[in-house]
Structures are given as C-alpha cells and as structure tokens.
C-alpha cells in the first residue's frame, strides 16, 4: 500500500480558506487525517477533494493510504490506522460495527437507472459453452474476494433472481479474480464499468448483463469511520464530509452532467489519472476512467433501504449475527438518507 501526503503552508491555506469564505478557526485546526482508498474511479470524490484543496479548506491535512480490498480497509478503520474510507458493505464490516468499532456515515457510489453501472461478466470459455445471460448462471463458478464480500452479495442476489445456484470461488483481491476470469478458472464475475469494459474488449471476457437490472438503486459503496470518530469527533467528521461532498459534486458535474463539456471531462481525467491506472499512459487510461463514470451520491446521501437489504441478506446467509440492527451499523445523523 502507498501513501500520499500534502502539507500546505499556513499562508497558502489561509488564502484558500479566505477565498472559499470559510472561517479562520477551521484553518487553525489543520487536523491530520488518514483516508483509506482503492485505486478505483469510484473513489474520485476523495481524490478531487484532496487535489483541489477542499479538505485543506475544511481544516484537514489529508494523507491517503491505499488498499487492494475492502476488508483490510475496514480493519484499518477499526484499529485507528485510518480515519475515514469509502468501501462496500461486507460481512466483516458489519461484524466490526457489532463490536462497536466502526460506523457507516454516508453513501458514495450507487447504481442508478439511466447511468451506466456495474457489469456482469462471463469468461470466454463459459460464454461459448452457453453462459450468454445470467439466466444461465446455474452451476457456474463466480469469483469473489472473500465470503461475505459485496461480490458475494451481488452474485447471490442475481442468482436468486434467476432461480440459479452458483459456486463461489474466493480469490482475495481483484487482480487474481481478473486473471482467473480471463483464463477460464472461474466462469463469471461482476465489477464496475471502468474494469468491465476494457476486459470485454480483450475478447477473453464478455459482458452478459447489468447489475442494476437486478439491484436497482443499490448502494454500492459507503463512507465510514470509527465509532470513536463518529461520536467523539463530530466537527472533524463534518469537515471531512464537507470536503468529500465538494469533490463528489465536481465529479458528477464533469463526468455525469458533462457541464464543462469535453474540456471539463479531460481536466477531470487528468486529475483522476494521478490515482487510477497510474501504470498506464494518460491516453490509454482515459477511456477506462471515462467508462467508469457512475454517479456518486451528492452530499454523501445514504440509501438506507439498500443497506437494509444488504444487511438482511448477510443475516439470511448466516454471515453475520441475526440480532444486528441498522442502528448498530449506521450513524444517520451526518447526511440525508434515502428510503429509510
């Protein structure tokens, strides 16, 4: 995992705060905060807030810590190594909430009708053998990171809708899942479009459906923090969500509404490329970044109905305790809620 840190001088920060009309006391705080992230386009709200000084203007000195899967990030929040992060709901995250270690405080990425979303994929071998639609899921091997991951949830909900039964193969990280799908070691998977579309162009993988057709308005990822921060560091948490929300608004304006036209898209791609597909030149990374343009939740609004459905599934599968309530998992005092 890598770290990125930006320290700003008081003079520069003071000018930025003055320009934004924020009170001087927020600047004086200059709280050092560690933010967990994956190198996914869906984490762009944090990257934009950092690059455009929104976190600094909110009085926060942000450092990123990068991960390759959701579960280690949740453990890092619980241990205090990371202060805030964006990730999908998993069995591990719910169990940490039950122990009083973490709280979900907002929403990040959502499936939305009319916006291109996560894709359902089949390996070339499975596709040629008849897996051309999720209706043919029965008996196939589906890739997941771990049992109780968001991939597990999506696969199970899609299979249930089709009256099918899947075999799940845990491979820990996204990279090994991609390798297993391309080589035919697993038959199917679901993933965000900026990963799915390039894979489908390789010919080794085929898109056979959309997650939104089975999970409309699915709250894919959430913003979360430690229970300690949620209850005892309210000002810092509000400041984080303020900066994050401004980053999200910029992302949606540029990449979804296209309010800045091609210039706005290109400017945003340049920024995101500092964090996503950094091993590729800009011209090769740009199509994948643009393909990943799913809407992020304005103001970090949280779809409580979707989180409730996810919690109920984890409980029905025996992956978390049946007595865990939404109140155990969520702190809804920070953002607007949807469906709950």
Image (cartoon, rainbow, N blue to C red):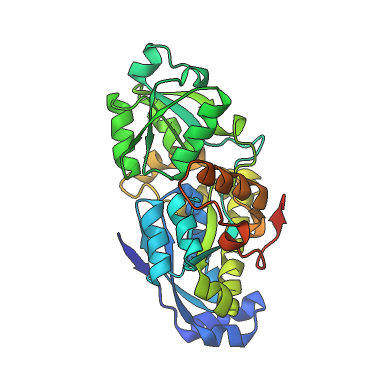
Question: Within the image, what quadrant is residue 110 found in?
Answer: top right
Q: 36 and 17: which one is in front?
A: 36
Quarter of the figure with the N terminus: bottom left
Residue 298, horizontal then vertical, whole percent: 65, 55
In the image, taking residue 179 as reference, residue 82 lies left or right, namely: right
Occupied quadrant, residue 275: bottom left
Q: Is residue 99 above or below residue 256?
A: below
- 50 left or right of 303 in image: left
Residue 23 figure quarter: bottom right
What residue sits 60% from the left and 57% below the top? 325
Q: What residue is shown at x 60% (from left), y 42% (from top)? A: 218
Residue 244: image x %, image y %?
56, 63
* 249 or 304, nearer to the observer: 304
Give the number of marks.
Answer: 0
Does 320 appear above or below 56?
above
Examine the rendering and report whether any part of residue 190 can be seen: yes
- Provide residue 122's location: percent of width, then percent of height: 41, 24
Residue occupying the far top of the picture = 129
* Residue drawn at 58 percent across, 50 percent down: 264
Instruction: Report whether residue 58 is seen.
Output: no
Q: Position of residue 277 (x, y in %)?
A: 37, 46
Residue at coordinates 33% horizontally, 27% vertically from top-left? 186
83 above or below 245?
A: below
């Amino acid at each position: 995992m890598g770290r990125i840190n930006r320290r700003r001088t008081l003079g520069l920060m003071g000018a930025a705060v003055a320009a934004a009309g924020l009170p001087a006391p927020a600047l004086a705080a200059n709280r050092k905060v560690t933010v967990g992230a994956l190198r996914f386009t869906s984490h762009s709200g944090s990257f934009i807030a950092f690059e455009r000084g929104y976190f600094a203007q909110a009085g926060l000195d942000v450092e990123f810590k990068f991960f390759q899967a959701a579960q280690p990030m949740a453990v890092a929040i619980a241990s205090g190594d990371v202060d805030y992060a964006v990730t999908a709901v998993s069995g591990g995250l719910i169990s940490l909430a039950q122990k009083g270690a973490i709280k979900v405080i907002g929403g990040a990425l959502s499936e939305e009708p009319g916006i291109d979303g996560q894709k359902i994929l089949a390996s070339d071998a499975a596709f040629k053998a008849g897996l051309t639609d999720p209706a043919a899921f029965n008996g196939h091997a589906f890739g997941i990171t771990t049992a109780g991951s968001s991939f597990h949830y999506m696969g199970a909900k899609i299979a249930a809708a089709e009256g099918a039964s899947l075999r799940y193969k845990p491979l820990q990280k996204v990279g090994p899942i991609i390798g297993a799908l391309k080589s035919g070691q697993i038959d199917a998977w679901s993933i965000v479009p900026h990963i799915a579309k390039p894979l489908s162009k390789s010919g080794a993988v085929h898109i056979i459906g959309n997650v939104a057709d089975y999970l409309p308005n699915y709250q894919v990822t959430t913003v979360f923090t430690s229970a300690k921060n949620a209850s005892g560091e309210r000002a810092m948490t509000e400041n984080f969500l303020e900066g994050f929300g401004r980053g999200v608004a910029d992302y949606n304006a540029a990449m979804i509404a296209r309010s800045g036209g091609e210039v706005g898209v290109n400017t945003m791609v340049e920024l995101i490329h500092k964090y996503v597909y950094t091993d590729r030149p800009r011209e090769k990374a740009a199509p994948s970044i643009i393909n990943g343009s799913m809407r992020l939740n304005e103001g970090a609004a949280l779809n409580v109905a979707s989180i409730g459905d996810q919690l109920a599934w984890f409980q029905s599968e025996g992956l978390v305790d049946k007595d865990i309530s939404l109140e155990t998992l969520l702190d809804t005092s920070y953002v607007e809620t949807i469906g709950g």
